[in-house]
Amino acid sequence: MEENGFRCGFATIVGRSNVGKSTLMNRIIGMKIAITSPRVQTTRKRIRTVFTGTGGQIIFVDTPGVHKAKTKLGQYMDRAALESMKDVDVCLWVVEPKSKINDDDREIAQVLADSGKKIIIAINKCDTVKKEELLPVTEAFSKLVPFEAIIPVSAMTGDGVDILTEEIIKNLPEGPALFDEETVTEETVRFLSSEIIREKALKNLKEEVPHGIAVEIVSMKEESDITRIEADIICEKNSHKGIIIGRGGEMLKRIGTQARYDIEKMLETHVALKLFVKVRDNWRDNENLMKSYGYDSGDL
Ligand SMILES: Nc1nc2c(ncn2[C@@H]2O[C@H](COP(=O)(O)OP(=O)(O)OP(=O)(O)O)[C@@H](O)[C@H]2O)c(=O)[nH]1
Ligand SMILES: [Mg+2]
């Protein structure tokens, strides 16, 4: 694996919310590690994964979508994304096939250009447009930053993804792999389990309720044939608590069943999952609470 010409380095994935950054990363590594959803602001903190191919190894950093932050959590998320560009070899800018550039794109472009890093632009969701519609998109984005390549892809169908992966590797420094081939992520099972529960909350709850949710794993006990997990779903208003529990506990049961199914697949063992709902008023603007749920500005 470490013969001459092998390349290894870090690539951060940045872009507006909901453009498909996490879906694209999962597609490249061939495993669902980062949670995804049709809603904005799904990813909240950096998530690292590893892709190892014959020619190189990419350590990906998936980041939250850049947006106009309205809470301290939002500010933390924007910093997590924008500052990730400092520590990497390649910045992968994921955009949608729409030629309209907005303020968030311009802010990202500015930080990308200032970073001095190698930039690759991926135009994702190409399955949603005709080929001829890509030209104006390519033109619009290629004017904003100096870049190594601009590649149309679809994280959903896999189109263009191999070409993109090769292009990223081509732009990494030569050097031996940092992780063994089997490693896909070093994120903890606790964190990944809490994210799965949050994903099911995002999927089942409406409007602003899921955006105010955090998940805290209270305990995780491995027994010979079962893993027992207790987790708190934190919400920011008393009125949200009833919605999350649902009539006769139905909503909480649904979130729990779906989450348990995915956690069982990840851990390859039976799981008993107990969920509790707690209210922490406006925790998204309370740095101490944010920190206790894993969103620590000091870590950025
Ligand atoms: N049609 C289509 N949909 C896609 C594609 N890639 C992602 N999506 C969908 O776009 C939505 C957002 O995907 P995510 O991967 O969560 O987006 P993200 O950029 O990580 O979003 P944040 O974490 O909120 O910044 C999901 O509903 C995905 O299924 C694609 O190539 N084609
Ligand atoms: Mg994401």
Image: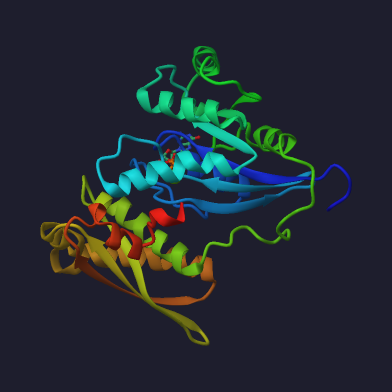
Point out residue 155 in the picture as x, y percentages from the top left corner.
54, 38
Residue 190 higher or lower than 37, as above or below: below
Q: Residue at x 41, y 39 (%)?
A: 65
Toward which corner of the image does residue 260 lie, by quadrant?
bottom left
Q: What is the residue that sits farthest to the right in this orientation?
A: 4
Left or right of 284 in this view: 120: right
Please state the total of marks drawn on the protein image.
Answer: 0
- Front residue (pair 100, 145): 145
Q: Is residue 193 visible?
A: yes
Point out residue 8 in the picture as x, y percentages from the top left corner.
73, 46
Residue 284 higher or lower than 69, as above or below: below
Q: Residue at x 50, y 12 (%)?
A: 136
Q: Residue at x 39, y 53 (%)?
A: 297
Q: Is residue 124 visible?
A: no
Left or right of 178 in this view: 27: left
Colour convention of the picture: rainbow
- Front residue (pair 248, 192): 192
Q: Residue at x 65, y 33 (%)?
A: 164
Toward which corner of the image does residue 216 lie, by quadrant?
bottom left
Point out residue 184 in the picture as x, y percentages from the top left corner.
62, 57
